[in-house]
Amino acid sequence: MELRFPLLMDAATGTELQKHGMPAGACSEQWTLDHPDVMINIQKGYIAAGSQVVYTPTFGANRVKLEANHIFNKVGEYNQRLAAIAKEAAGDKAMVAGDIAPTGLFLYPMGSTTFEDFYEIYKEQAAALESAGVDFFVIETMMTVAEARAALLAVKDVSDKPVFVSFTCDENGRTLTGCDVTAVLEIMQGMGADAFGLNCSVGPDKMITQLKRLGRLARVPLIAKANAGMPQLIDGKTVYDCPPDVYTEYTGEMAEAGVMVYGGCCGTDASHIAALKEKLAELRMKHPDPEYTDKLPCATEKELFFLEPDAGYSRVLDCTPELEDTLEDALEDEDPIVAIAIRREEELDTFADYQYMISKPLCIVCDNAELLEAALRLYQGRALYDGNLPAEVLKKFSRKYGLLY
């Protein structure tokens, strides 16, 4: 499927459902299934205002979120039924994006969930949305790199349709777990995300600062789906204070930064979409034009690095019980890269336990394709490679995991 830019997405779902009677704290997926006409009317309003895309109302339709609402063994059924509602609203006038969002769980050791747990949760939902016939996928409101990586891998394993990834961050460009969004961008575009951006958390006046940072580095179109300002509690109700004319004041700067996908998040409605449509008609889109193209873009989970192509290392660390100590020493030396060897399957647990210490670009040294792939799934950054594996294997891992070799 070919996507044409600028692309105007939809606006808020949750806050609009609440305006139409959904009680606070309700399971929005169940409420939507019980009141499908409400969602259809909201989405038809967005399309009439100019939205070219509506999201499936499946934000919380992963296994974890559904089970928290006492809905068991219904992931496939709920995603297909909810997608059908969006498809009915869209008809032949708009595309439908399969919406995938956080589980609320955290990767070990911050939580008890493994990376493969996340992958299986998202693969189940992605497969259901693929069978429902969505036009492409949006992985949105992400707060942790592990969930976003797992979701992106899962979608790509069940579909060849485009995948957008959107994170939420604070005014300083940090996610809930302290990751810089520039590092997240590099990880996601390295893994083949077709667009990357920001949604939720802040209004356009705060989001523009981070979009400009991303615009210097992006090789893919950027996404901007801001809130209608910061929420305020007035007379017991949550109120957003950014009307459409103010909301679109930063659209020109966003376009100049490389934003090519627009829409609204919490507190926005059809009037914001109409204002965006009018504003976008006046603007020319700027295609991605990243800086630092002569350097190697590496990332830990939290930070982005640009290495000289000839950057190297003076020693290789072994995945032994002493890795914590040797890693501490390596992080303090002058080498720009930390190199860690993976030679046996039993070493993967040690690697997983201590990868969060890594604060320099990582080079994985390995001559076994299965072990290398296992390490790449465990490592929540963008790694370099050294070893003797054939080019066809490394090309596959470069496309899938962003491996640099």
Image (cartoon, rainbow, N blue to C red):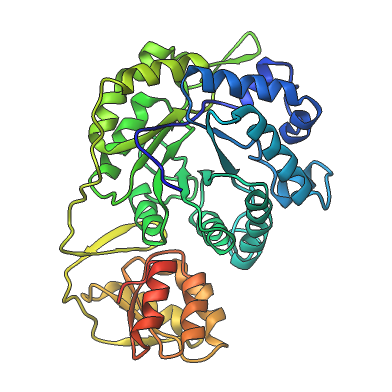
Which residue corresponds to the image point at 52% horizontal and 44% vertical from the top-left?
138
Residue 103: percent from left, percent from top: 64, 49
Question: Would you identify the image quadrant in which residue 308 lies?
Answer: bottom left
Q: Vertically, is 14 above or below 300? A: above
In the image, residue 380 above or below residue 215: below
Q: Quadrant of the C terminus?
A: bottom left
Q: Residue at x 75, y 26 (%)?
A: 36
Instruction: Name the image quarter holding residue 239.
Output: top right
* Residue 243 in the image: above or below residue 191: above
Q: Position of residue 160 (x, y in %)?
A: 51, 58
| Of residues 7 and 32, the one drawn nearer to the viewer in this rendering | 7
Query: Which residue occupies the extreme top position in the image?
Result: 235
Image coords of residue 402 (percent x, y): 38, 66
State the residue in front, 280 or 143: 280
Q: Report the side of 84 relative to 238 (left or right).
A: right
Q: Is residue 258 visible?
A: yes
Q: Where in the figure is residue 197, as x and y percent of width and height?
A: 40, 42
- Farthest-out residue, front: 92
In the rendered image, which quarter is residue 246 located in?
top left
Any part of residue 269 in sight: no
Rendered position, 32 above or below 243: below
Residue in view at x 56 percent, y 64 percent: 157
For the residue pair 121 and 348, the one nearer the viewer reads as 121
Q: How many marks?
A: 0
